[in-house]
Structure formats: structure tokens, C-alpha cells
Amino acid sequence: MFCTFVPLNFSEMEKLKLIQISSSGYSQLFGLGLVEKGIRACNARGVFDTPIAEWNIAMMVNLARNLRAMIRNQERGLWERPRQFQNEIRGKTVGFWGYGGIARETARIASALGMRIYVLVPDGRIKKRENIYCVEGTGDPEGKLPEKVFSIQQKSEFLSGIDFLVLSMPLTEKTEGIIGEEELKTMRKGSFLLNPARGALVREHALIRVLEEGHLGGAAIDAHYYYPMPSDHPLWKFPNVIMTPHISGSSLSPHFLERVWTIFVENVNRFLEGRILLNELTPSQLEGG
């Protein structure tokens, strides 16, 4: 089966052996009992690495130079040239919480732009990526780009040493609300948060409070708490927050169909030949762990 969400008559499909979903997120598979039924599942990791990485880079430049303020000045015909408009990201430190394909491709570009790369992963070790779809020439498959790698026990040291925090992890029971007020306030004053992953990774009211208090320099948010975000939601009103409607990587990306069908066809061939599948989800992942 190739889908994004399984159909309503999924329970009647007694001979189903393999599900390929067209999204990187896989929470729609929770509660379906796939492990018990012996159904294997793969996601679309790698399909959106390039567009979301480019979104991350664009947001870092925009936040650092406060492009929103420049555009407001343009609309008002106002000529102002403050120091912030002339910032650069070279020499800044970008920290990735999670180091999957999106983080690795962002790190590749950021490194070429002269940024330092920090990474936080649960056990403090970066693994070589194997049997995961990757567009040729992109990413950091060997995991050689980070200058420093931190474990979850070193969270405070990681957060306090970065200028940009990029969330790059799936939403699970363990990661929901993993970023709260304590984590946001541990970040350097004036630093920036980027969330192209899942809105619920960050506690909504904690983010609003920290922005209101002026601790963060700003934020760029592509994954949200509500779909669509209500027009009166406080996050729309912050002058230092960029809100995009979950388009950093989507099915309208120019190479989405080409890449996702490549994964599906490759996995069908691998399944029939008894080979290791691309992007296969583990039993723990399928159970929401």
C-alpha cells in the first residue's frame, strides 16, 4: 500500500504486508496494531531534506537581519539603517536537536556558509546513515560536520552555546512538549528558535511567555498547534516571529512526486527480493516510542 493515511477499510486488508507512506512524520500509523499484524512500514524520510533545509537557511538569514522589519519599513516608505539589518550568520552557531536528514542537509549548507554546527542526540553519538533515502550529493551521511555533539544529559550546555536552535526530531510520546520554558530560557538571550518539525514539540504557552519577555531574539515556525492557526492567535502578532503555513516541505515541492515514487518503487523491489528496506520504521517507532 502506498498512501499518506491508511483508508477506512484498512482492517479488512488481511493480506497487507507493506505500507509506504508519503510523509516523513508517521504518527498517523500509531494505534493501528501494525507490529501485531506483521505489517512493515516505511516513511518518506529524505524527500523533504532539501526544501526544508533551504527554509532553515532562509529563516536564519531573515531572522538575523530582521527582514520583517525591513519589509515593514519598505511598505511605510521609511528609510532606516540600524545595525541589525546588517548582520551576518557566518561565525554563528546553529544547534540541531536531532540529526536526521533535514538537519544533516541544513548542516551541510550552514557549514559552507561558515557556521559552527552543534548537535544534541539522546546518547551523544552520531551514527552513519544507512538504508535511508537521500538525494545524491546532499546531507552529511558520515556525520562528520558537527564541531560538538551533546547527549541529553548535556542539554543545558548545548542550549546555552548556540545562536540558532533547529528542531529536527519526530513527534512521539517522549518528545511532545520537550521544549518548555526552562529550555527556551537556557538558550542565549537574543538567540532564535526554528521549528520546521512539529508544533507540539514546543509548549505553546511557554513559547508565548518567553517571546513576550523578550528573551528570544525571535522565532521561525512552520509547524503549528492548530490547522489552520486562528487569525487571533498571539504568535501572529510578534514582530520578530516568522510564521509560514507548513510549506517548508510539502507535496507541492517540485521534486516531491519524483522522490517519493523512487522510494516506493525501490522498496517494492527490495521487499520482493528479501533485501533491507529504505526508511523502515522500527516496532518501537510504530508503537509511538
Image (spheres, rainbow, N blue to C red):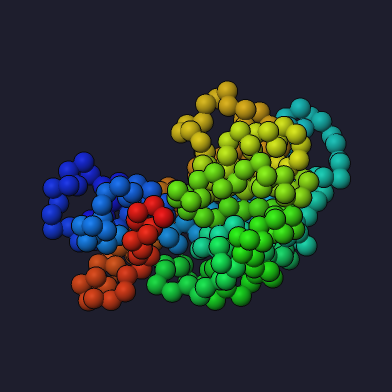
Q: Residue furthest front?
A: 153
State the image coordinates of residue 184 (x, y, percent, origin top left). Answer: 68, 45
Q: Residue at x 31, y 74 (%)?
A: 276
Image quadrant assignment for residue 117:
bottom right
Q: Is residue 184 above or below residue 76?
A: below
Q: Residue furthest top?
A: 232
Q: Residue at x 13, y 58 (%)?
A: 15
Image quadrant assignment for residue 14:
bottom left
User: Relative to 188, is 1 on the left or the right?
Assistant: left
Q: Is residue 79 above or below residue 189?
A: above
Q: Residue at x 86, y 41 (%)?
A: 82
Judge whether residue 71 can be spotted in this image: no
State the image coordinates of residue 94 (x, y, percent, origin top left). Answer: 68, 58
- Quarter of the figure that contains the C terminus: bottom left
Judge whether residue 231 can be spotted in this image: yes
Front one among 60 and 211:
211
State the image coordinates of residue 59 (x, y, percent, origin top left). Answer: 65, 48
